[in-house]
Image: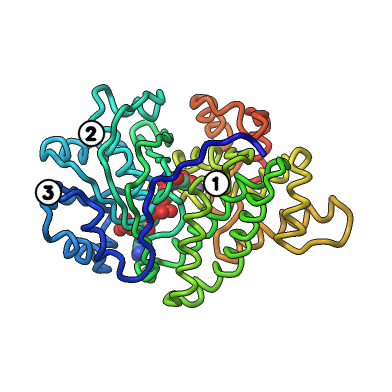
């Protein structure tokens, strides 16, 4: 097992009705800015429920944080938070709203150009405290210190990670996910699945409980994902899905284990240039990535084939082929297509994607830092 330091400070309020408890998590007298997206939380009544819980606070609102949140929009919230002397943020929505709120939290007290937090990994020394009410199980943003923001003007989708931007608390009420469109439910399953793959499908490091934990989460997604689509208001299914997605990227399974993340980096460029949903890009890239890197991932792919997909027959190559095929079939079964061409994108897209990877310094990716531009080209080519 690799050395690690693990600390996760986010308090989780899990279950139906937990929004009512948030007032106890926010300092008395705080001026709270509620941030949300394109209006789903207005339609579903979640915003009203949050406002009722905050009746004793001064509350302001910022709407319109888009999927793949943009710097351009978020900077308007930064101005509002500064001018209104906001001292607590509350994100109500999916990963985009939470990620956007993390950027706002870091940018408000930042003295330079906030884009540098992403583009130059400029250090931050403080951030506004914030909480979240999650409405879409997928990203794990509700219990981690990562944030991904897009600059629309330049089509750059970049991330920053900082312990100062863990949410103070997150409400995970599975009933708040009943209204999700099937596409977003499926996206959530694919995103969580890929987060686990990025931390599990690398090389053996004798991290036994992390491996078995990862396998348990993958099996749960395979069991519950299709049910979540078939029975949108099945509380038990939504509860399991929600907690699985959180555990997939809250640091637990990655502690002491090698991590990859090349699939995410290649996927981010596809979203930035072509606007696909985050999870759609992962469904495209992951099967191709596993195929191109099957040699260095051999031992873990065989373990994955056996323990997750029950593949014990045939030689090693056949079992690895089987595991990659099952992964692709699972994504397709959720109606998330796994080829660029299914989204109308052809081989002509590869050169611009590689140019963006290069511009972003993404030239030594993966658990061995050996995924350079040529291997990324092979992955994109296989993904067409
Ligand atoms: O904007 P509204 O109107 O709220 O609608 C949203 C949005 O259109 C809708 N939605 C959310 N909850 C709903 C709902 N509709 C009905 N009922 C509900 N309960 O769903 C749409 C997508 O929302 P979004 O927040 O964009 O999705 P997701 O949670 O998948 O977040 C994706 C973003 O997270 C980043 C991605 O790159 C992408 O920008 N990621 C963040 C990570 C992190 N912080 O650790 C890790 C991930 O790998 C990922 O990169
Ligand atoms: Zn992801």
* Camera-side mark, 3 or 2: 3
- Whole-percent x, y for residue 228 in the image: 50, 71
Position of 12 with respect to 351 (left or right) is left
Distance in Å between CA atoms under marks 1 and 2: 38 Å
Residue annotated with mark 2: 108
Which structural element holds mark 1?
loop
Instruction: Compare residues 255 and 336 and report the one nearer the observer.
Output: 255
Disc 3 packing (10 Å; few <14; some 14–19; many ≥20): few
Quadrant of the rendered structure where residue 111 is? top left
Look at the image and name its color scheme: rainbow
Query: Which residue appears at 51% of the width and 54% of the height?
Result: 247
C-alpha span from label 1 to label 3: 52 Å
Numbered disc in front, either 1 or 3: 3
Q: Specify whether residue 384 is in view.
A: no
Kindly tell me whether residue 347 is visible in this rendering. Answer: yes
Indicate the position of residue 269 as horizontal and vertical percent values: 50, 38
Q: Nearer the viewer, mark 1 or mark 2?
A: 2
Q: Marks 3 and 2, Cα distance to the nearest angstrom?
A: 19 Å
What mark, if any, has residue 44 been given in the picture? Answer: none
Tags 1 and 3 touching, CB below 8 Å: no
Q: Residues within 10 Å of mark 1 (few under 14, many from 20)?
A: some
Q: Is 159 located above or below residue 209 in the figure? A: above
Which residue is identified by label 3?
29
Mark on residue 345? 1
Kindly state the secondary structure of the residue where label 3 is placed: loop
Residue at 30 percent across and 34 percent down: it is: 106
Of marks 1 and 2, which one's residue comes earlier in the chain? 2
Residue pictured at 76% horizontal, 64% vertical: 310
> Would you say the beta carbon of the disc 1 residue lies within 8 angstroms of ligand 1?
no
């Amino acid at each position: 097992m690799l050395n690690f330091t693990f600390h996760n400070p986010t308090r989780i309020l899990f279950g139906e009705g937990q929004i009512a408890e948030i007032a106890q998590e926010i300092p008395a007298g705080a001026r709270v800015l509620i941030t949300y997206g394109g209006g789903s939380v207005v339609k579903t009544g979640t915003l009203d429920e949050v406002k009722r819980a905050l009746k004793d606070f001064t509350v302001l609102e910022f709407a319109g944080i888009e999927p793949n949140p943009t710097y351009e929009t978020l900077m308007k919230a930064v101005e509002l938070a500064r001018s209104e002397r906001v001292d607590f943020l509350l994100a109500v929505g999916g990963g985009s709203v939470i990620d956007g709120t993390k950027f706002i939290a870091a940018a408000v007290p930042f003295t330079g150009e906030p884009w540098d937090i992403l583009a130059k990994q400029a250090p931050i020394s403080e951030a506004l405290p914030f909480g979240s009410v999650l409405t879409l199980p997928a990203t794990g943003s509700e219990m981690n210190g990562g944030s991904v923001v897009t600059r629309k003007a330049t089509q750059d989708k970049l991330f920053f990670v900082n312990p100062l931007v863990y949410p103070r608390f997150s409400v995970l009420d599975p009933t708040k996910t009943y209204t999700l469109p099937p596409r977003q439910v499926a996206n959530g399953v694919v995103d969580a699945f890929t987060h686990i793959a990025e931390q599990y499908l690398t090389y053996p490091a004798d991290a036994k409980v992390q491996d078995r934990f990862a396998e348990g989460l993958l099996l749960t997604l395979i069991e519950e994902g299709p049910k979540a689509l078939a029975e949108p208001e099945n509380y038990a299914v939504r509860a399991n899905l929600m907690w699985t997605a959180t555990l997939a990227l809250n640091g637990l399974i990655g502690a002491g284990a090698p991590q990859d993340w090349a699939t995410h980096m290649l996927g981010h460029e596809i979203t930035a240039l072509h606007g696909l949903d985050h999870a759609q890009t992962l469904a495209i890239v992951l099967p191709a990535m596993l195929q191109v890197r099957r040699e260095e991932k051999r031992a873990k792919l065989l373990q994955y084939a056996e323990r997750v997909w029950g593949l014990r027959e045939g030689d090693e190559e056949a079992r690895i082929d089987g595991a990659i095929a099952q992964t692709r079939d699972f994504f397709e079964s959720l109606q998330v297509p796994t080829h660029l061409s299914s989204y109308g994108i052809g081989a002509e897209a590869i050169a611009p994607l590689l140019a963006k990877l290069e511009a972003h310094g993404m030239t030594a990716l993966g658990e061995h830092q050996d995924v350079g531009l040529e291997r990324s080209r092979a992955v994109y080519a296989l993904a067409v």
